[in-house]
Image (cartoon, grey):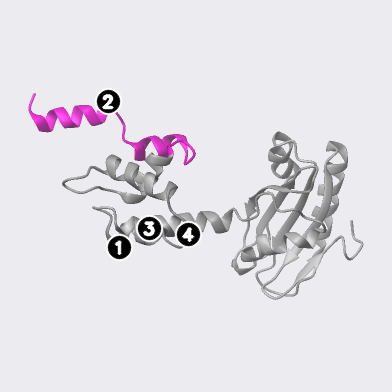
């Protein structure tokens, strides 16, 4: 068996991390393997797996203000790979900034979901909270057409139940038109409230978002 055939057979019997991630989901890879996916390749002197380990070590020893320079100092990184890693870390930080944030009143959640107001299709969002009203998770339940999104209570509550959430706040954006509830919004809110009452999970609010304002069912005494 020549080297080319040997390499081919090895790949067939040992799927690479890209194949395994596609098959098992993005939570499957280790931290080092996630970096391998970001880096894509190593150099002639430094295989990607070894380069990823070096990046992990530098990340663990760096602060936000010196991370980029420390990454650039790794032989084999260069500007493109450095910025790709730094950008991924920053995006993750921004998207998870809500973790453990305390919601004293439902509208406190708006800074963590306001970016959905920029979407051109309706996104229906559910935030689950623990007993201390700390945010556990913010997830997209459905993405609809421009003026309609289809939701069902089981899709809203299945994950909060699994997380042992004590409360939920729902929200959706209005890409166009006024920041006012439609009849469908009112009916869906009533359905969600009834389901929450049966499940024993507090339904704190349903918030409609536009680029410039919001509408709270709670503040308008519509819950």
Residue 87's place in the image compared with 128, above or below, is: below
**Mark 2 or 3, closer to the camera:** 3
Spatial CA span between label 4 and label 3: 15 Å
Q: Earlier in the sequence, mark 1 or mark 3?
A: 1
* Residue at the spot of label 1: 79
Residues drawn in magenta:
1-30
| Location of residue 85 by image quarter | bottom left
* Residue at the spot of label 4: 64
Identify the element where label 2 is drawn. Answer: helix
Q: Earlier in the sequence, mark 4 or mark 1?
A: 4
Identify the element where label 3 is drawn. Answer: helix
Q: Is residue 159 left or right of residue 2?
A: right
Q: Residue at x 34, y 56 (%)?
A: 71
Residue closer to the observer: 76 or 169? 76
**Mark 4 or 1, closer to the camera:** 4
Name the spot of residue 223 as percent of width and height, x first.
89, 56
């Amino acid at each position: 068996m020549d080297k080319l055939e040997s390499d081919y057979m090895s790949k067939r019997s040992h799927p690479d991390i890209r194949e395994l991630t596609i098959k098992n989901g993005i939570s499957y890879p280790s931290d080092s393997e996630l970096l391998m996916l970001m880096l894509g390749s190593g150099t002639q002197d430094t295989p990607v797996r070894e380069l990823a380990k070096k990046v992990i070590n530098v990340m663990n020893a760096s602060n936000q203000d010196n991370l980029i320079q420390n990454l650039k100092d790794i032989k084999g990184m260069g500007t493109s790979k450095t910025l790709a890693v730094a950008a991924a870390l920053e995006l993750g930080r921004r998207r998870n900034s809500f973790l453990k944030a305390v919601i004293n009143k439902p509208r406190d959640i708006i800074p963590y979901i306001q970016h959905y107001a920029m979407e051109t299709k309706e996104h229906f969002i559910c935030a689950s909270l623990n007993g201390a009203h700390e945010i556990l998770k913010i997830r997209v339940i459905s993405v609809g057409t421009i003026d309609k999104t289809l939701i069902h209570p089981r899709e809203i509550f299945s994950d909060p139940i699994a997380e042992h959430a004590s409360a939920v706040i729902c929200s959706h954006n209005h890409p166009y038109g006024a920041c006012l509830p439609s009849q469908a919004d009112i009916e869906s809110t009533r359905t969600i409230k009834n389901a929450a009452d049966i499940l024993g999970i507090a339904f704190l609010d349903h918030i409609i978002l536009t680029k410039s304002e919001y509408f709270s069912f709670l503040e308008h005494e519509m819950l």
